[in-house]
């Protein structure tokens, strides 16, 4: 009786199948990562507000930087 794993065609088909599975998985995760990046972009004002919330800048600095940002956006 012949063992199926001793056949070189079985090994080749197994490697091809494994390659296809890996390719499908990588494409799936790449699409998910691109979608996450697309929706997670923060504006300068969002980042500035987060810095104020964390206490990295004072209210005075926040107001000045906010004024600078909004005047730059309007130009």
Image (cartoon, rainbow, N blue to C red):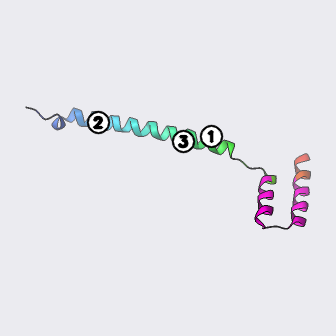
Asked where in the image residue 65 lies, by quadrant, the reply is bottom right
Residue indicated by mark 3:
30
Q: Is residue 64 magenta?
A: yes
Examine the rendering and report whether any part of residue 68 can be seen: yes
Q: Nearer the viewer, residue 68 or 52?
A: 52
Q: Mark 2 points at which residue?
A: 14
Q: Distance between the residues labelled 1 and 2?
A: 32 Å
**Separation of marks 3 and 1 at Cα, in angstroms:** 9 Å
Cα gap from disc 3 to disc 2, whole angstroms: 24 Å
* Extreme residue toward the left, this view: 1
Q: In the figure, is residue 30 to the left or right of 7?
A: right
Along the polypeptide, which appears first: circle 3 or circle 2?
2
Residue neighbourhood size for the residue with mark 1, other residues' Cα within 10 Å, grouped as few (<14), some (14–19), many (≥20):
few
Q: Main secondary structure of the magenta part?
A: helix
Which residue is found at the position 37% from the left and 38% from the top? 19
Describe the element under mark 1 as helix, strand or loop: helix
What range is drawn magenta here? 46-69
Q: Residue at x 67, y 42 (%)?
A: 38
Residue 62 picture location, percent across and down: 86, 62
Q: Visible in this render: residue 75? A: no
Residue 44 versus residue 15 in the image, above or below: below
Mark drawn on residue 35: 1
Q: Check disc 3 and report its element: helix, strand or loop.
A: helix
The quarter of the rendered structure image containing the N terminus is: top left
């Amino acid at each position: 009786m012949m063992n199926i794993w001793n056949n070189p065609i079985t090994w080749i088909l197994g490697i091809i199948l494994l390659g296809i599975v890996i390719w499908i998985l990588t494409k799936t995760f790449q699409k998910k990562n691109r979608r996450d990046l697309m929706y997670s972009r923060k504006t300068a004002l969002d980042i500035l507000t987060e810095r104020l919330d964390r206490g990295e800048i004072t209210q005075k600095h926040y107001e000045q930087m906010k004024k600078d940002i909004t005047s730059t956006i309007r130009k």
